[in-house]
């Protein structure tokens, strides 16, 4: 009986101390982090999503404004660098095509991107 009471008392004290620490001493603080704080992986994913949007609506100014939120000084060069990195690292071909289309919209088509440009249905002969 004494063992059960000790066990229940320990659980109760542990529960109360956990709630006190979680709510009073160190509560979770939600902060709206800026886009500039994203890790490179998520910056790349965001850029691919913007490229996918550009492929649908062809709004180059909208894509430019959305990518400026990442805080990069030269957006067209940034898109070119990501596109070339995706190509050299053999990433998803569909993502590469989207990025190539966006880079081409920015006037940053390089020889490395030419093969993926010909895979786009709208640019094929």
Image (spheres, rainbow, N blue to C red):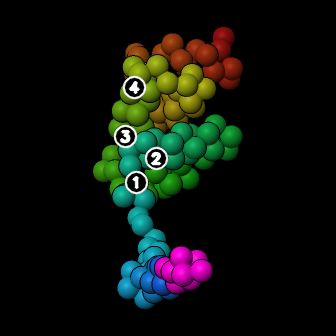
Q: Earlier in the sequence, mark 4 or mark 2?
A: 2
Residue topped by disc 2: 42
Disc number lying in front (4 or 1): 1
The total number of labels drawn is 4
Residue 87 occupies quadrant: top left
Q: Nearer the viewer, residue 91 or 18?
A: 18
Measuring 49% from the left and 24% from the top, which residue is drawn there? 91
Per the model, the C-alpha gap separating discs 4 and 1 is 20 Å
Residue topped by disc 3: 78
Mark 3 element type: helix
Determine contact: label 1, label 2, CB under 8 Å. Answer: yes
Per the model, the C-alpha gap separating discs 3 and 1 is 15 Å
Q: Which residues are magenta?
A: 1-12
Residue 58 drawn at (x, y percent)? 63, 41
Residue topped by disc 1: 38
Left or right: 39 with respect to 14? left
Per the model, the C-alpha gap separating discs 4 and 2 is 17 Å
Q: Is residue 40 above or below residue 86?
A: below
């Amino acid at each position: 009986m004494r063992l059960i009471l000790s066990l229940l008392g320990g659980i109760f004290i542990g529960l109360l101390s956990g709630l006190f620490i979680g709510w009073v001493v160190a509560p979770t603080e939600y902060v709206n982090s800026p886009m500039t704080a994203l890790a490179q992986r998520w910056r790349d994913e965001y850029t691919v999503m913007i490229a996918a949007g550009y492929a649908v609506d062809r709004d180059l100014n909208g894509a430019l404004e959305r990518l400026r939120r990442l805080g990069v000084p030269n957006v067209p060069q940034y898109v070119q660098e990501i596109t070339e990195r995706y190509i050299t690292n053999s990433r998803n071909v569909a993502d590469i095509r989207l990025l190539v289309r966006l880079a081409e919209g920015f006037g940053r088509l390089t020889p490395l991107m030419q093969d993926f440009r010909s895979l786009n249905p709208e640019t094929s002969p």
